[in-house]
Image: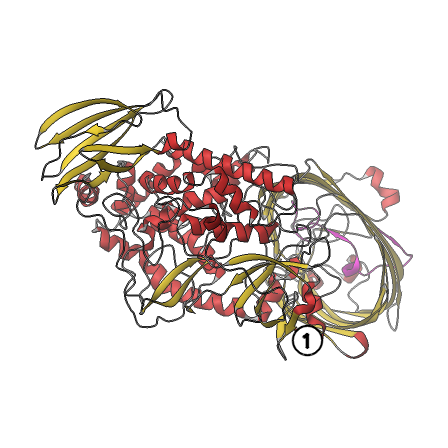
């Protein structure tokens, strides 16, 4: 029996078991009702949206890739990290005198995570430079203790917020992008607002967390380089990318800690067919902190969540250093959707060079979907399984790799 | 439960009595009466997609009588046909190439027009912001208004040629289409109306007069000598009233009485669209125009925008899946998912198109029954074998010479690409004939010569079957008197007794390698003249 006939029989059984038999005209009117009544309203609403310049700017994104944000309003989705809930926002970009471009954006999540950014920049040939102001609040961050042996049942919650002021300069030289920022940032700790869990401040004494619970302020010098040989940064399917960053933080005022963070990441994509409908994607990332001082726990690298160890809760592990390796097999199942099978391995260390050899890695595996819509919206859905159970991740916003 | 099933069957079966309407042959539909000016109709692109992809399929699955008829092999036939199972001329359709073969000049001319005067100046009055390709509305020296659209820069000629070729094929098939002409011109003839602003790629409005035009034209295809090449589509006469739907009727058009999903010319359009690989059939690509003809004001229904036919998907060549599956095809997605992507979808391919100007279009690999539009079209989903046969015989009516003549209007500069496209279209035509003419008896153009019945065999006319091997067994039946008249060869005149009462002549076609195909013809003496008064395939 063909699939079509199966559907027909199911349709008949469905209706016969329901409200009884109608004449064809009656059935027709029942079937058409949603189209004629609800449909007209939906059509009007969608027409209204489609006619807005705002909508055109969204749909035009993929057709006009360029540097920097597009002029005018643009919606923002995601971008506040795991555990922040559903995030939406708006960005407005405009150019004005002497080639300066200003961007103001705001994001707000269902868990009251917030980020507001104002930036001003101007291009001088291949160099773009300008100031950036930001304020961010993350009220429901998770903390399980530090180290690879932290207890999964010791989940606690803390909040952190604060402003940031920076001068950012970026230069694009072929496949290489250099980026420097000199910034001041402040971190104000407060009791976490996820009332399902005790606060970190209640659960752990100040001596049990790196850097204690004091607020902090830093002047930070960051230099980063990106070597990008990927075919499409928005949805890479071939090529490679290496990123490296050195970040020197100097505590100011009451903050005594000074430390230097080194980050190195390598992304590698191996297409298995000419159309890149099937590919292997690999990522390795290492973070190493150099310091004699205690690094505030909220600035330590973390593992766990939709972007690292997907079989573990977000921010499940944290310590001075971290190492993560991921392998994915991605294959196209629809023109806008890839399915993914993945395996992750990673661990946090007091010192990656000294401890990596004798500390077992945390591992997980799973599968998922990557959706890249024609209007530029991207989303990921992953299910990861580890020794600590199965985690489900849904993430809206641009692909990170 | 059993009672319910019987009730459903009782409701469904009367609509499928296998007896055709008999009577005079109507060739002109009564749908061009004066009507009050209808309101504008607008349809959201997203809504149309959601409706076609999700809502209407659910509606069809829940339509009990339709499903019962489908199960017992008696689907609801088209309502808008005459006793010869043909479509009368109407505000939707005009019988052209199948009924009376058009000359090569006529098929090339299509709906007429030579395009705007390339000497200019052309005044830009509006920008085209809907759809996926950039366009400008211009007024030429004569005051005629055109929409001009361009090729993607990496695939010059692809969509503009497709648009010109498509308009002529659909016109010759019988549909109302705009005058589409390929034009090449120097951009200096373009003059923007004062203060005209258009939405740029970022969505922000830009003034064309203040450098915006250069920006606008910076991403369009050009000829080898740097001129702009475009399709100039003349504005359709009358007042545009928005697209027509492929289902239901237009409530503000009293002439529109037949649900569109049951119109033969819309159901059978699926086969013609498959021939031309028009995977982008949708409401947005149609237009109702309030016209005045012969002193009457009514809505005339047009197909428009053929930039996504043949191997073109307007901004890029067709992908392997376009024309082979719907945008959202759950079956194909599931197969790809569970096989870890190893499953190869129909039409899936690795290589780039050999000829950028024609994009990607299959020829002899076409499987007509599996051809798909971007999303299900209500009228196409209702297509029966008889509807498909009607569409197939229009496709079959295009000779090799006509196909070549129409393709030349695409003004391809690559002669090899042009000849490849001609060959591909011939192959697609033959694939359609081979499929649909094996499902419905292809005997057609039945008429009397004296007291003998004569007919054409369209499969033989199309050189898809050997006239020497085909036989026709003829049986006549009238008032319970059955008489076998005999077996005849191709081209024979069949002597039949004709009375003042309708009588049925059953013709069964046999040919080695072909299925046995039958049709019934009802004949009657009308005003003393033997006449075909009904046909059932």
Crowding near the residue tagged with mark 1, few <14, some 14–19, many ≥20 C-alpha atoms within 10 Å? some
Coloring applied to the structure? secondary structure
| A304 lies left or right of B240 | right
Magenta stretch: includes residue B174: no
Whole-percent x, y for residue B234 in the image: 51, 63
Whole-percent x, y for residue A105 in the image: 68, 71
Q: How would you classify the magenta stretch by its main secondary structure? A: loop
| A36 lies left or right of A333 | left
On what subunit does the disc labeled 1 rest?
Answer: B
Residue labelled with disc 1:
B209
Q: Can the viewer see residue B386?
A: yes
Q: Which residues are magenta?
A: A287-314
Numbered disc 1: secondary structure: helix
Q: Quadrant of residue B8 in the image?
A: top left
Q: Can the viewer see residue A286?
A: no
| A302 lies left or right of A38 | right
Magenta stretch: includes residue A302: yes
């Amino acid at each position: 029996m063909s699939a079509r006939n199966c559907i027909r029989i199911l349709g008949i059984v469905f209706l016969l078991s329901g409200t009884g038999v109608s004449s064809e005209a009656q059935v027709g009117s029942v079937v058409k009702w949603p189209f004629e009544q609800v449909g007209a309203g939906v059509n009007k609403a969608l027409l209204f949206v489609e006619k807005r310049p705002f909508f055109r700017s969204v749909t035009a994104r993929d057709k006009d890739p360029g540097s920097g944000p597009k002029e005018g309003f643009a919606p923002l989705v995601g971008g506040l990290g795991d555990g922040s809930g559903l995030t939406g926002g708006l960005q407005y970009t405009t150019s004005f005198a002497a080639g300066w471009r200003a961007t103001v954006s705001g994001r707000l999540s269902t868990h009251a995570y917030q980020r507001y950014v104002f930036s001003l920049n101007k291009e001088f040939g291949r160099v773009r430079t300008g100031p950036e102001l930001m304020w961010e609040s993350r009220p429901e961050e998770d903390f399980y203790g530090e180290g690879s042996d932290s207890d999964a049942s010791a989940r606690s919650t803390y909040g952190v917020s604060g402003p940031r002021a920076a001068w950012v300069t970026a230069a694009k030289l072929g496949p290489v992008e250099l980026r420097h920022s000199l910034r001041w940032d402040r971190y104000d700790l407060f009791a976490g607002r996820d009332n399902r869990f005790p606060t970190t401040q209640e659960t752990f004494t100040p001596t049990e967390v790196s850097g204690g619970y004091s607020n902090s302020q830093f002047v930070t010098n960051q230099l980063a380089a990106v070597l990008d040989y990927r075919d499409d940064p928005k949805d890479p399917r071939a090529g490679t990318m290496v990123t490296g960053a050195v970040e020197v933080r100097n505590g100011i005022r009451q903050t005594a800690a000074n430390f230097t963070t080194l980050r190195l990441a390598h992304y590698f994509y191996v297409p298995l067919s000419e159309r890149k409908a099937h590919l292997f994607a690999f990522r390795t990332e290492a973070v190493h902190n150099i310091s004699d001082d205690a690094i505030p726990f909220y600035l330590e690298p973390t593992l766990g969540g939709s972007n690292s160890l997907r079989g573990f809760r977000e921010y499940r592990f944290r310590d001075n250093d971290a190492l993560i390796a991921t392998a994915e097999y991605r294959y196209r199942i629809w023109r806008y959707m890839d399915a993914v099978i993945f395996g992750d391995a990673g661990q946090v260390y007091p010192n990656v060079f000294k401890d990596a050899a004798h500390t077992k890695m945390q591992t997980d595996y799973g599968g998922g979907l990557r959706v890249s819509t024609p209007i530029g919206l991207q989303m990921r859905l992953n299910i990861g399984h580890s020794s600590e159970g199965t985690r489900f991740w849904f993430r809206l916003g641009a692909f990170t790799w | 439960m059993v009672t319910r099933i019987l009730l459903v069957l009782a409701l469904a079966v009367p609509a499928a009595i296998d007896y055709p309407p008999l009577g005079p042959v109507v060739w002109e539909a009564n749908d061009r009466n004066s009507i009050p000016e209808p309101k504008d109709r607008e349809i959201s692109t997203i809504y149309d997609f959601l409706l076609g992809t999700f809502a209407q399929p659910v509606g069809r699955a829940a339509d009990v009588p339709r499903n019962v008829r489908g199960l017992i092999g008696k689907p609801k036939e088209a309502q808008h046909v005459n006793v010869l199972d043909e479509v009368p001329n109407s505000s939707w359709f005009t019988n052209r190439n199948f009924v009376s073969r058009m000359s090569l000049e006529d098929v090339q001319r299509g709906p007429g027009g030579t395009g705007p005067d390339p000497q200019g100046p052309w005044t830009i009055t509006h920008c085209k912001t809907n759809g996926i390709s950039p366009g400008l509305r211009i007024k030429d020296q004569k005051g005629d208004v055109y929409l001009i659209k361009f090729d993607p820069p990496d695939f010059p000629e692809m969509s503009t040629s497709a648009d010109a070729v498509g308009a002529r094929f659909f016109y010759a098939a019988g549909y109302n289409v705009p005058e589409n002409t390929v034009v090449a011109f120097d951009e200096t003839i373009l003059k923007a109306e004062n203060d005209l602003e258009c939405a740029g790629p970022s969505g922000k409005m830009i003034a064309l007069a203040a450098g915006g035009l250069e920006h606008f034209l910076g991403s369009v295809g050009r000829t080898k000598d740097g001129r702009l090449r475009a399709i100039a589509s003349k504005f359709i006469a009358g007042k545009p009233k928005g697209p027509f739907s492929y289902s239901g009727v237009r409530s503000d058009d009293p002439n529109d009485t037949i649900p569109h999903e049951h119109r033969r010319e819309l159901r059978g359009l699926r086969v013609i669209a498959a021939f031309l690989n028009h995977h982008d059939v949708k409401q947005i690509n149609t237009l109702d125009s309030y016209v005045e003809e012969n002193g009457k004001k009514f809505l005339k229904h047009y197909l428009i925008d053929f930039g996504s036919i043949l191997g073109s998907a307007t901004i890029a060549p067709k992908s392997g899946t376009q024309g082979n599956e719907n945008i959202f095809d759950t079956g194909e997605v599931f197969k790809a998912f569970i096989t870890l992507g190893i499953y190869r979808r129909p039409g899936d391919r690795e290589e780039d198109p050999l000829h950028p100007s024609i994009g990607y279009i299959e020829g002899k690999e076409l499987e007509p029954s599996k051809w798909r539009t971007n999303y299900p079209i209500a009228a196409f989903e209702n297509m029966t074998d008889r509807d498909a046969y009607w569409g197939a015989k229009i496709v079959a009516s295009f000779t090799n010479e006509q196909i070549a003549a129409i393709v030349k209007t695409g003004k391809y500069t690559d002669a090899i690409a042009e000849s490849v496209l001609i060959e591909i279209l011939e192959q697609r035509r033959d694939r359609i004939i081979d499929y649909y003419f094996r499902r419905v008896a292809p005997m057609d153009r039945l008429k009397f010569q004296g007291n003998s019945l004569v007919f054409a065999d369209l499969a033989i006319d199309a050189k898809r079957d050997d006239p020497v091997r085909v036989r026709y067994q003829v049986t006549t039946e009238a008032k319970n008197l059955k008489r076998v008249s005999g077996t005849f060869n191709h081209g024979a005149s069949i002597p039949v007794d004709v009375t003042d009462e309708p009588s049925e002549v059953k013709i069964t076609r046999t040919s080695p390698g072909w299925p046995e195909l039958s049709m019934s013809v009802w004949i009657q003496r009308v005003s003393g003249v033997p006449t075909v008064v009904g046909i059932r395939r």
